Image: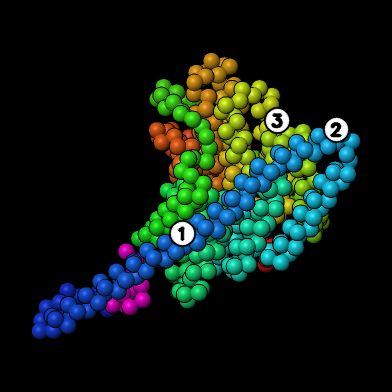
Amino acid sequence: MIFHGKSLILLEKLGALGPEYFCGENMNKKTDNLLELLVDKRRFSLRLLLEGLAVGLGAGISISVFRYLLAGSEILRPVIYHNLREALADGQWQWLALYILSFIIIAYLLKLIVAREPMCTGSGIPQIKGILQGDMSMRWFSVLWSKIIGGVLAIGAGMSLGREGPSVQIGACVGQGLSQTSRRTRFESRILMTAGAGAGLAAAFNAPLAGVIFGLEEMQKTISPALLLTGITASITAATVTEVVFGMSPVFSMGYLLPLPLNLFDVLVATGIVIGLLGRLFNIALAYSLNTYSRLGLSGMKKPLVPLALAGILGFVLPEILGGGNLLVDSLVVTDYTIGFLCLLFVGKFLFTMICFGSGVPGGIFLPMLVLGAAGGAVLAKLLVLAGLLPAMYYADIIVFGMAAYFSSVVKSPVTGSILILEMTGSFQHMLALLVVSLTAYVISDLTGGRPVYDELLDRALGKSK
């Protein structure tokens, strides 16, 4: 159990006195001390509960705004490309000049945001881990609005980045803001930031349970009653807010998925092995992309201009890989793509994600990771069906398992991955299968020397700062 302040002092004193202390003529006074200890502990727990509600509410509102703006950009982007194609077909080339100018303006704005607030770059999850470890610090309000605006500009323009990393950092900013304005201790501040980070993930994906597990497994790597109480309260509150705004349906529309029978669990293990190996390439390529940008000496608006220019081209030739990619996952289930096109989607999304994240603009890799896992699972499922090793009715199941396996291989948080995919797809009958495929991918990553991607990114950031 965790005690705080006067409770901890009293507990230490009472423990040092021994059992003989509780006998004798001063029993009434000693009983009053015990009552004081219990009352103080209850007050602390009640305060954490209320603070968890406040953090969850703040995170839910902030991330709802973020998600709403991103959803608007996802609707607007294909309309812009459609109208631009028609304009160019009619010979109205002035619209192409305006189109190019808009990307230059976005690159300039992203440069200004990153230069003004360096802590808003990239995913944001490594930065929060660094703050919790005491190695970094941030100005919470500046990071919060910079992350929202920068993320909307980058992802809305078509970069292959996700909303979840920024959402985690936004939630942590709310937690830090509450702790600073109410002048909480370092211990309590860490609890509120961790709860805020979990609430951010819960709000990003309508996944409250995954938010709690993420805070414990990835951010803190420990469990305590105080952290559990605050984390659960914040995640449920944040998810409730976003569900009021966006509805209660799962993020991915997979339809009804048949439970995988036990006699096909060998296919499940094979999926974990194959997708786990593909996940190992993600970390390697990510480091290479970051090193390449450094080696080329790109700075200022040149860094975001590279992926933005590529996004402008891909919008005409392969628009499926633009943005986060949750619509692409849905299309993998309902559209009968050829194996060749599925491979193109996987390779294109993989390379484009590396180029986008290497630029250092605000945006995460969480959702692109899941999309890559789904695309890799779709390719594998097609091959298994053609080879007669998998009934076609379980094709969508392998796509779901591919997401969990890829996440577990890259992030090395198998429990979070299993619970997250469970909540994002609504396939609660697949709990056992998701755990099996996630643990298999985790073991493969471990045997091949894989490290958690956010730990690698944190080490890299700390190395630069020294």
Identify the residue under disc 1: 56
> Reading the chain from its start, which is encountered first: label 3 or label 1?
1
Identify the residue under disc 3: 344
Q: Secondary structure at mark 2?
A: helix
Q: Where does the image place residue 42, in percent across and percent down from the top left?
A: 29, 69
Magenta stretch: give its range: 1-10
Q: Where does the image place residue 451, in percent across and percent down from the top left?
A: 57, 48
Q: Is residue 115 magenta?
A: no
- The answer to which of 106 and 388 lies nearer the viewer is 106
Mark 3: few/some/many CA within 10 Å (<14, 14-19, 20+): some
Q: Is residue 6 magenta?
A: yes
> Reading the chain from its start, which is encountered first: label 3 or label 2?
2
Q: In the rendered structure, which amino acid carries the disc numbered 3?
A: Leu
State yes or no: discs 1 and 2 in contact (Cβ < 8 Å): no
Identify the residue under disc 2: 89
Q: Secondary structure at mark 1?
A: helix
Q: In the rendered structure, which amino acid carries the disc numbered 2?
A: Ala
Which residue is drawn at the image coordinates 72% and 39% (left, top)? 79
- The answer to which of 365 and 9 lies nearer the viewer is 365
Tell me the quadrant of the picture where the N terminus can be found.
Answer: bottom left
